[in-house]
Amino acid sequence: MEDVTIISNGVSIEGKISSKGNIRIDGNIKGDVTAQGNLTIGESGYVQGNINGQNINIGGKVDGTATAKEKITLESKSVLKGDLITRILVVESGAIFDGKSSMTKNDDSLFKESQK
C-alpha cells in the first residue's frame, strides 16, 4: 500500500510540496506540488502553482501548469487555469479549462522539460 499525504479542508500551506507517494489536497496550497505517485485535488482544494504527478485528478481549482506522466482527469466541477501536459486527457462535462494542452505518446521530453 502506497503512502497518501492528505492536506485537509481548512488547511493552508505556502511553499513547495513533494512526495514519493500519493497526495490528496482538499485545502489551499500556494506553491508547486509534486507527487511521484498520484495527485488528487478534491472539490474544496485550491492550488496556486504548478502540479506534477503520475496521474492527476482535479476536482477543485488549479491556477498553474498541470503535468502528468500518464493521465489528467478534469472532473465536472474542476477549474484549471493554466496549461496541461499529459498522455491521456479526460474532461468531464462542466469542467472549465483555460489554457493550452500538449499530449505526448512515448516521448517523455515534455515531462522532463516541465521538471526543470
Image: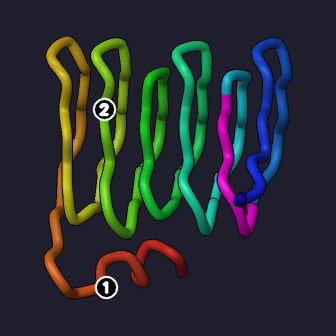
Residue 90, how many percent across, how many down?
19, 40
* Residue at (31% x, 55% y) in the render: 71
Look at 82% across and 13% down and name the residue there: 10
Marks 2 and 1, the one that precedes in the sequence:
2
Residue at image location 49% in from the left, 21% down from the top:
60
Q: Picture coordinates of residue 28 (x, y %)?
A: 72, 25
Q: Position of residue 40 (x, y in %)?
A: 54, 38
As drawn, 39 above or below 6: below
Q: Which range is magenta?
A: 19-25
Task: Using residue 72 as the reference point, say whether residue 39 is left or right of it.
Answer: right
Q: Tell me the amino acid under the disc marked 2.
A: Leu
Dot 2 falls on a residue whose secondary structure is strand
Q: Nearer the viewer, residue 49 or 45?
A: 45
Q: Is residue 98 above or below residue 114?
A: above
Q: Is residue 13 above or below residue 42?
A: below
Q: Is residue 13 left or right of residue 29?
A: right
Inspect the image, locate mark 1, and give the three-letter code of the amino acid beneath it.
Answer: Asp
Q: How packed is label 2: few (under 14 Cα within 10 Å), some, or many (20 or more)?
A: many
**Residue at left 60%, top 33%?**
47
* Label placed on residue 108: 1
Quadrant into which the N terminus falls: bottom right
Q: Which mark is residue 74?
A: 2
